[in-house]
Image (cartoon, rainbow, N blue to C red):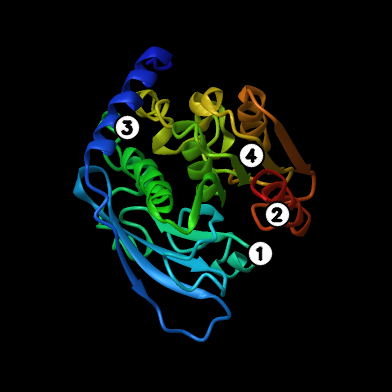
Amino acid sequence: VGMANPADIEAFWCETLARLARGPLDEREEVVRDPQPYLHSRVTVLSLGGARIVAHLGRPIGTTKRNDPRRLPAIVTAPGYGGWEFGQTLSECQRGYLMLQVYPRLQGESGPAPEGPEHLLTGIEKPDGYYYQGAFADVLRGVEYLRSRPDVDADRIGAMGTSQGGALALAAAALDPRLKVCVAHVPFFCDARHSEAFRGHELSKPENLATFDYFDPISLAGRIAAPTLLSSGGQDATCPPAGIRAVYDRLRGVRCLYHDPELTHTSSPDFYRMSWHWMERYLG
């Protein structure tokens, strides 16, 4: 089975985004009373197919009401493949942003995941109904929620994430051209057709790759216009650097790739500092 036709991928996402836009957001926010030096809320919204998605919102102290006249930049982020691990914490809101941590469907607080195939294989028989169609939509729904808030500057919203969260940040930037910046640390499943990480994995079957082409960051990278910062690790067997470099090469806007030859699939203090410099540069 050959690679999916780019025109088919484009048509698929145009239809998916149109369906998403037709659904109500139906946002609900509940203040979380916990001893943190910032304001914390639990938010739910409706996403593609009527799935109700959970997210957590962090706001700097001083923006105590939704009708506060000051509008701040905002960042949406998503967890790693385990569904709970966020590379960016709510406390980062104290830098002067609203931080929204979105749990995609069947992950973390939007779970529990049912017994059966892992996320990469759930519904992979065809693009419409594949797991990541919904997961990508869930992150985009988080962006729409941020735009709906009067305390958010809708022209200054970015996406960032690590591993799976990095792939979801890239997807958000590709599918919503209004996002102003993207940061993806060691993003997952880049260039799956050529990835050593999936050699022997069920995903590598030709019929499965034909579906995954619609979701692979390498297929969507050409849509990303926002300034994008990527990282890769020379010792990372989970998200091999060759695939991340292939995605980087397809980006059409301002771009930067930080490569650490000794980095495994873990955090990087150097890239952490670069990430927030990048956010300040393009959202500040």
Tag 1 and tag 4, C-beta contact below 8 Å: no
User: Of marks 2 and 3, which one's residue comes earlier in the chain?
Assistant: 3
- Count of numbered labels shown in the rendering: 4
Question: Marks 1 and 3, Cα distance to the nearest angstrom?
Answer: 32 Å
Q: Amino acid at mark 3?
A: Leu
Residue 240's tag is 4
Disc 1: CA contacts within 10 A as few (<14), some (14-19) or many (>=20):
few
Q: Residue furthest bottom?
A: 35
Tag 4 and tag 2, C-beta contact below 8 Å: no
Which residue has dot 2 on it?
Answer: 276
Tag 1 and tag 2, C-beta contact below 8 Å: yes
Q: Amino acid at mark 1?
A: Arg
Q: Is residue 106 visible?
A: yes
State the image coordinates of residue 119 (x, y, percent, origin top left). 36, 47
In the image, what residue occupies the spot 70% across and 54% down? 276
Residue 15 or 238: which is nearer the viewer?
Answer: 15
Q: Place residue 42 in its image quadrant.
A: bottom left
User: Of marks 4 and 2, which one's residue comes earlier in the chain?
Assistant: 4
Question: Marks 4 and 3, Cα distance to the nearest angstrom?
Answer: 30 Å
Question: Marks 4 and 2, Cα distance to the nearest angstrom?
Answer: 24 Å
Which residue has dot 3 on it?
Answer: 17
Tag 4 and tag 3, C-beta contact below 8 Å: no
* Position of residue 32 in the picture relative to residue 165 (left or right): left
SS type, badge 2: helix
Which residue has dot 1 on it?
Answer: 95
Question: Marks 2 and 3, Cα distance to the nearest angstrom?
Answer: 29 Å
